Image: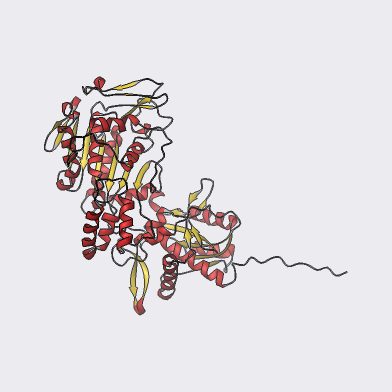
Amino acid sequence: MATGPEFVVDFPTLWVAADWIEHHCVVPDGFRKGEPFEMYDWQLWATINHYRIRPGATRGQLAPAFHNRRSQVVAPQKTGKGPWTAALCALEGVGPALFHGFAEGGELYDCRAWGCGCGWHYEYEPGEPMGRPWPTPLVQITAFSEEQTDNVYRPLQSMIRYGPLGELMKVGEQFIRLPNDGRIDVVTSSAQSRLGNPVTFVLQDETQLWNPVNKMTRVATTQRRGAAGMGGRSLETTNAWDPSEDSVAENTALAAAKVKDIFRFHRLPPASLSYANKADRRRIHRAVYSGSTHVDLDAIEAEAAELLIKDPGQAERFYGNRIVAGLGAWLERHFWDARADERELPPPGTRIVLGFDGSDMDDWTAVRAETLDGFQWTPTYGPDQRPTIWDPADWDGQTPRLEVDAAVADLMERYDVVRMYADPPYWETEVDTWADRYGEKKVVRWYTWRTVQMHAAAERLLTDVTKKDSTFRHDGCELTAGNVANARKSARPGGRYVLRKAALHQKIDAAVSSVLAHEAAGDAIAAGLAKVRKPSRMIVLR
């Protein structure tokens, strides 16, 4: 995930694709209509990452030649996602979107060789990846409704009509005809008959609105399967999502935290800024709209201020680019993100505590660790250094109990663990075994259903995350951050609460483990365990 203002390219990519766009696509509307379409910095960054080539790629490979199988761009309203993705659809239709080998130097991409009479050509540098068009492209522009597909389809129509692409692409109301029997189609939730076609490129727009209820989750997976079968790829654009809605956008972000072949661009504002504060909100807008020079921040402020009255969460998602939960959230994610620290992880032998929350088949199982000076992280274990968060879906539908036991043994051996708070349900036997193996004082059965204790523990972590002078920090684990955002306060008598999920599909187990680890750290400090006792000196009398 890119968050900084500067972008460094130190990998091979199809620069010819980026240049092709700027020489064939035009500004679709406004005062500069018809002028060459020059990508903003963030648009170019996302483009060259989507077309990043694996160093070992071989000529003739399709999707496997690329470093990223698919991409996701999370950006606020009005940043220019529509015209940019329209240009990518044009590229995938008739431009050099496929890898065509590495250049020896001096080779040309000549438009005339591919049926375009504009006269443009591109000379490759030695070792540079070369590109070529698809032989029979089938591109799909997909959104929940026709109005949303218009965000991309209308700019694409204009680019074709007012630029050099008109001699190659024939515009229709519902599809664009391409050479060699190719086409660009529009697909919506009400027109899914085109699903299952052997697509070469899929644009999925506004995926924060795609979910199982409106059946767009099925659309997303069906299209990706169709693209995979043809060696094609997909690109997803979205606003920040509500974490209670099980959206395709959220699930892509979770997948990207686990695998290395999904590129994500999500420019985040400083986590310490409050969207409710007008001065902070202005700074947030400047950060997330950086580079989009057409945007009038005064107009954005006016829209955001009006929406804040009715739906502050939606305003912050739409214009602040933050993943904000609805009402009743336990801990707003931007507070949690503000405590992320990229320090090196604690070395072996460090005195730590552990928090454990387990499940069997439905939820995740997680272990979080914390030092006694307030740094929390998701540790790793075993020869492959896997993270200690287990999703049963990754293990044939059931949590791998032997893996979890091996992880606990690894952590106990590697670190000086002085306290482990473990929630026993579904794991009574394992927790009893750990208590017997490592000691009852070290492994403590800590039931999260106890209202008084759980409320106090959740409040302790909440306070230490949100107060300004707190020294609490964490590793920025994306899976844990998502679980924290999912957690809601479930009211109990006496003004107390326990933590629950906003929706059945969501996971909060890593958040609960964080609460238990932090509570264990506080109790260990209170018990004097933060002080390392020096060995007593032996006096020998003669």
Picture quadrant of residue 283 = bottom left
In front: 516, or 326? 326
Question: With 203 as the anchor, is 383 left or right in this view?
Answer: right
The answer to which of 398 and 462 lies nearer the viewer is 462
Task: Answer left or right for 146 relative to 240.
Answer: left
Colour pattern: secondary structure
Please provide percent x and percent y for residue 205.
24, 45
Picture quarter with the C terminus: bottom right
Q: Give the side of residue 13 with respect to residue 93, left or right.
A: right
Q: Within the image, what quadrant is residue 110 found in?
A: top left
- 64 versus 357 height, above or below: above
Q: In the rendering, at what x and y percent does residue 406 appear?
A: 53, 53
Residue at the far right: name it.
542
Q: Is residue 423 visible?
A: no
The residue that appears at 26% across and 20% down in the rendered structure is 113
Compared to residue 97, the image places residue 478 above or below, namely: below
Query: Can you name the residue that lies furthest to the bottom here?
Result: 494
Extreme left residue here? 173
Residue 32 visible in rendering: yes
Position above or below: 22 against 492: above
**Residue 100 pos. (x, y %):** 34, 25
Q: Residue at x 43, y 69 (%)?
A: 463
Residue 535 lies, in percent from the top left, at: 71, 65
**Could you tell me how many numbered marks the image carries?**
0
